[in-house]
Image (cartoon, rainbow, N blue to C red):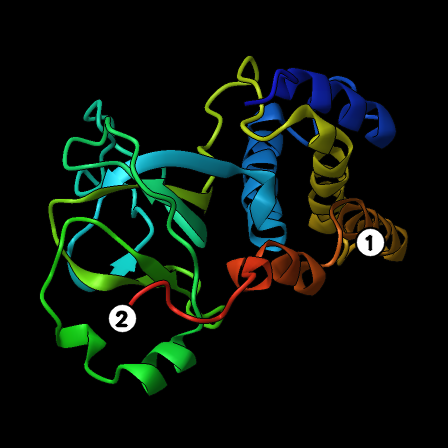
Amino acid sequence: MGTVLASAIFTEVSGVLFDTSAVHWTDAEKLRYLNAGQRQLAIFKPDAYVINDEYKLVAGTLQSVPDGSASFTNAAAATLVEGIQFIKLVRNMGITGLVAGNAIPIVDMAVMDAMNPGWHTETAAATVQNYMFDERDPKHFYVYPANTGTGYVESVYSGKPADLTATTDAIVVSDIYRQALTDYVLYRCYGKDAALSPYNAERAVFHWNLFVEEIGRMDLIKKYISPNLKQPDPSPSRM
């Protein structure tokens, strides 16, 4: 959670725009842009807003990141933040979510399929031995053995930042993204008048490029956080 207030970002933005009275670009308008910027940041750079919490798995091998509904709660019965992308499983947390258990190593699904084609239909258990992930399906992952729907795990995933509702609210992401979010809001503000002024169109592109440079390229970041790059051994721990 950040500490930078929306109003602080808007003061900087209004100074660049020479609109310190917020007449042409209102604070309500800039607040919409700031919220959009936080969401865009989380999409482009999934590790910008990471959630680490426990939750109960559903029955079967196919699992998903929390969807922001009451179907996904932690051991304290708090609804978890909606997920954008799975990052990794850490460990088992028992059937209450309070008891730390064995670590959960990742394995290659192709290896699992080749060595044990019937693994999806084996007897279910509350404890997870391995998990698998495909970057092309970022909101889902698989566990072995199939879960009974009673086992909790500690999971790490990229969350969707909650919208700010007032200028006195602090940004949800880390303060290190203050400048990137400032440039995103400027991009949207200049984009508002892009059709009327080629200069504003150029300024919009300029601040968009700054935003992208400040957060890094999505394709590189996405590969960096993939759990498949952190596996020391592609073989399942036990069949």
State how many labels appear: 2
Q: Nearer the viewer, residue 133 or 105?
A: 105
- Residue at the image point whose x is 67% and y is 59% from the top: 218
Label 2 to label 1, Cα distance in Å?
A: 49 Å
Q: How crowded is mark 1: few (under 14 residues within 10 Å), some or many (20 or more)?
A: some
- Residue at the image point whose x is 62% and y is 54% from the top: 44
- Residue at the image point whose x is 53% and y is 17% from the top: 169
* Residue 62 visible in the displayed image: no
Q: Which of 87 and 98 is in front in this view?
A: 98
Mark 2 or mark 1: name the one nearer the start of the chain.
1
Q: Which of the 4 quarters of the picture holds residue 41? A: top right
| Residue to which mark 1 is pinned | 209
Image marks 2 and 1: residues in contact by CB distance under 8 Å? no
- Residue type, label 2: Met
Residue 236, given in percent of the width and then of the height, sits at 38, 68
Is label 2 in a helix, a strand or a loop?
loop
Residue 194, given in percent of the width and then of the height, sits at 77, 54
Identify the residue at the far top of this view: 168
Q: In this view, does 60 lie to the left or right of 162?
A: left
Q: Is residue 213 above or below residue 94?
A: below
Q: In this view, does 189 lie to the left or right of 123?
A: right
Q: In this view, does 59 lie to the left or right of 6?
A: left
| Residue to which mark 2 is pinned | 239
Q: Which of marks 2 and 1 is in front?
A: 2
Q: Which of the 4 quarters of the picture holds residue 63? A: bottom left
Q: Residues within 10 Å of mark 2 (few under 14, many from 20)?
A: few
Is label 1 in a helix, a strand or a loop?
helix
- Residue type, label 1: Asn
Residue 211, given in percent of the width and then of the height, sits at 77, 46
